[in-house]
Amino acid sequence: MRVLVTGATGFIGANLVRVLLERDVEVRVLRRQSSPTLLLDGLPVETFTGHLTDPESMENATRGCSQVYHLAGAFETGPDAEARMLDCHEKGTRVLGEAALRMGVKRMVVCSSSITLPFGPLDAPAAEDDDDPFEEGGVPYRHELLAYYRAKKAQEREARALIPKGLETVIVHPDFVLGPWDIKPTSGALILQIARSPWIPFYPPGGKSFIGARDCALGHVLAMERGKPGRSYLLGDHNLTYGEAMKRIARVVSRPPPAVPLPSSIPRFVNALDRVFGRQGSRLSHLATHLESLFIGRYRSPERARRELGLKSTPFETFVDEAWKWFRDHDYVRRRR
């Protein structure tokens, strides 16, 4: 069986490709001309260079494939961020999906984001189909996060619109992913920040749902095998406050844990500056948006993926240690990126 993987040169995609190869799946990867190939070097994969929004290119990429894993995405900043993200997520998903249909592909897994799902408090995490308080203008995001939220929502609409045409699409929503092959790094930056500092005394009072990179990749495969078309599956396993997560990470990397919550006055002060001096895409607006998100507890239930997909749970410390080993082996600890 041959499958196409988009976004294979990224963090989650690199883990997915390895899981598929372990299952003796023939993997074709789509990459842009400018995409680095470091995460694919040495792997027995077929590489196809093309662009998501080019119909002919996508027909060639999907020809001969029985399934498509669509992980390609972008988080953009700047004045045109939303337009560029919509082009990638909305148009790219539509063009890829329609090309897949013409080439006889029957099933596609689309990687969205947890940002489009509702969330709840730690003692009552939200499920995928809980009432979405964001639909009527109550989205707790601004600037780039708001643009990303809209682009991902548009992507999901395009994915579901393919179902009546004959392409079974299943949508997965990774949350805070930690593990190896985090080349930029993305979420793994939290591990490196703690490891590189003698002590980080403060922690933000919010929290998230964490998952290991391998479990996240397996979630994509299980969604392909068992997921219901049009259904959303959160890929997040451990609901932890940032304080608790940072304490556990500090233990793995042999650093003292943070002890003091950041005062709530900090994001209020930065937000006030942003309202007066900020603009979309500026460093100030990006800082304000990032700080604001760290003060929100965004907890989501993993039960659907466990129940319907059979996704197992890896201990938090296990996948943090896997990420930490990968960073050490690739000399990230001393490097400042």
Image (cartoon, helix red, strand yellow):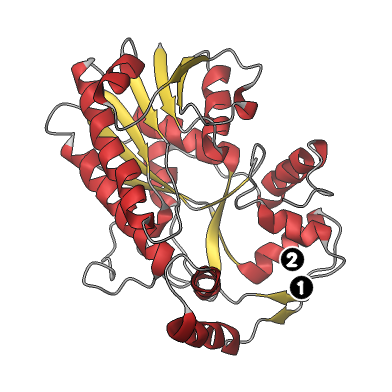
Q: Residues within 10 Å of mark 2 (few under 14, many from 20)?
A: some
Would you place residue 137 above or below residue 326 in this image?
below
Q: Quote the CA–CA distance across marks 1 and 2.
A: 6 Å
Amino acid at circle 1: Pro
Amino acid at circle 2: Lys
- Name the one closer to the observer, 63 or 12: 63
Residue 127 visible in this rendered orientation of the protein: no
Q: Secondary structure at mark 1?
A: loop
Residue 219 visible in this rendered orientation of the protein: yes
Quadrant (top left/top right/bottom left/bottom right) for the N terminus: top left
**Residue named by callout 1:** 258
Whole-percent x, y for residue 75 in the image = 45, 51
261 horizontally vs 306: left or right: right
Q: Secondary structure at mark 2?
A: helix
Whole-percent x, y for residue 182 in the image = 64, 42
Whole-percent x, y for residue 249 in the image = 74, 58
| Residue positioned 32% across, 14% down in the render | 60
| Residue positioned 74% across, 66% down in the render | 247
Whole-percent x, y for residue 143 in the image = 40, 68
| Mark toward the start of the polypeptide (1 vs 2) | 2
Residue 17 image label: none
Q: Quadrant of residue 294?
A: bottom right
Q: Quadrant of residue 120?
A: bottom left
**Residue named by callout 2:** 247
292 horizontally vs 202: left or right: left
| Residue positioned 66% across, 16% down in the render | 42
Identity of the residue furthest to the left in this view: 164
| Residue positioned 43% across, 26% down in the render | 5
Q: How many marks?
A: 2
297 horizontally vs 241: left or right: left
Q: Are marks 1 and 2 in contact (CB under 8 Å)?
A: yes
